[in-house]
Amino acid sequence: MAASRTERPEPAPARMRPRDVLRVGAAGLRTRPLRAFLSALGVAIGIAATVGVVGVSSSSGAELDRTLSALGTNLLTVSSGRTLLGEEAEMPPDAEAMIERIGPVESASAVGRVDGAQVYRSEEIPEEQTGGISVYAARADLLAAVGATVRSGVWLDGATLRHPAVVLGATAARRLGVGAAGPDVQVVVGGERFTVVGVLDPVPLAAELDAAALVGWPVAEEVLDFDGHPTILYTRCEEARLEAVREVLAATASPEAPNEVEVSRPSDALAAKQAAGRAFTGLLLGVGGVALLVGGVGVANTMVVSVLERRAEIGLRRSLGATRGQIRTQFLAESLLLSALGGAGGVLLGAAATTGYALQAGWPVVVPAWATAGGLAATLAIGALAGLYPAVRAARLSPTEALAAP
């Protein structure tokens, strides 16, 4: 009786540990460093654009929140509008006093436009070169009402309200070439010389004051023929009752014609501006996404070329016992590493760009964690998709076909 042959089981292929997968994936990148760098750069540019846009937008939003926290969101303005005939309406001279009688109102101040008064640096300036500067009569408590600060000099007080003294807005001072206030600095207002006693910083909640020359209410009436009608009323009220005050402001300021005045909340305008900025941010994110897609195509191209160039290596590994799955894992890991390097570099570039821009603008630096995490996740997804086809193609090569390739 013939001896029975013992069948030996085929040896199971060796398993690749995660460390081995990383090592073989990195080996392919090290052998072609320039190509790997250029492919990773394409991904990095897309991620940097995305993170940078989100970071700058978030930093801008943080600056707006900080500004509103400092200036308050409880400011309401009442401005004169138009009559039914299209003419400019006038608020009653006692509108400010009537508004102050509203219970939740904490403070109120006003400015009145002085029609016909022009501002010049000196009498030698041609009459037509007005510089677009408006002249307003102002109350002593205006500064606190609008949250403005004086950059140079002082604000109008009990003495200067009755004398030819003027405070210039930030834009008005720049147009007139006035760098700082002083007793020897004068401008011509309505044909009369006024001493510049102060220069304001930009006023976010009352932008109309930036291009204005502000004089005292009494001197405006005595010297500049001001009619005493307020043009804009600034009202601070209790935050919890702001909407209730807003509903009655028009009728209180102008009982006979409430439809001829306009009530607004300056902080809403700033928020609307920020919303418009977010829409523009969405457009820039789309551009960053296109750049990221182009980078992913570059990675896919690099991996396809890599498979074609390394057929002999693939055939040798298959002859030595590597399975199709291991070949597929090797090239997929290489693609993921390539994209991950580009993603990490892009996140650093985007964060650096955000930091530089925010510091230059004086904003808080905000780089949202979701933007960096999302950027890295996007690069891994791009890498997986870009490397899937080349990895499958490499795994399908038979050992004999791969070794026979030139």
Image (cartoon, rainbow, N blue to C red):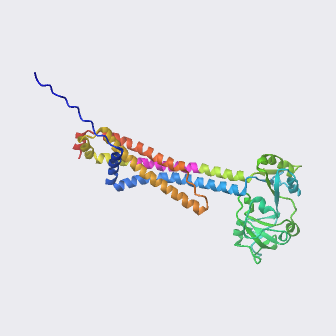
Above/below status of 16 relative to 144: above
Q: How many marks?
A: 0
Image coords of residue 347 (percent x, y): 49, 53
Residue at figure coordinates x 27%, y 44% from the top left: 314
Residue at figure coordinates x 23%, y 31% from the top left: 9
- Give the side of residue 347 with respect to residue 324, left or right: right
Image coords of residue 186 (percent x, y): 77, 75
Indicate yes or no whether the magenta region holds residue 148.
no
Residue that lies at the very extreme toward the left in this rendered image = 1
- Give the side of residue 299 with respect to residue 54, left or right: left
Q: Nearer the viewer, residue 155 or 167?
A: 155
Q: Main secondary structure of the magenta part?
A: helix
Image coords of residue 386 (percent x, y): 40, 44
- Give the side of residue 355 with respect to residue 207, left or right: left
Indicate yes or no whether the magenta region holds residue 287.
yes
- Is residue 300 visible in the rendered image? The answer is no
Q: Nearer the viewer, residue 80 or 197?
A: 197
Quadrant of residue 384 within the rendered picture: top left
Image coords of residue 184 (percent x, y): 76, 78
Q: Which residues are magenta?
A: 281-299
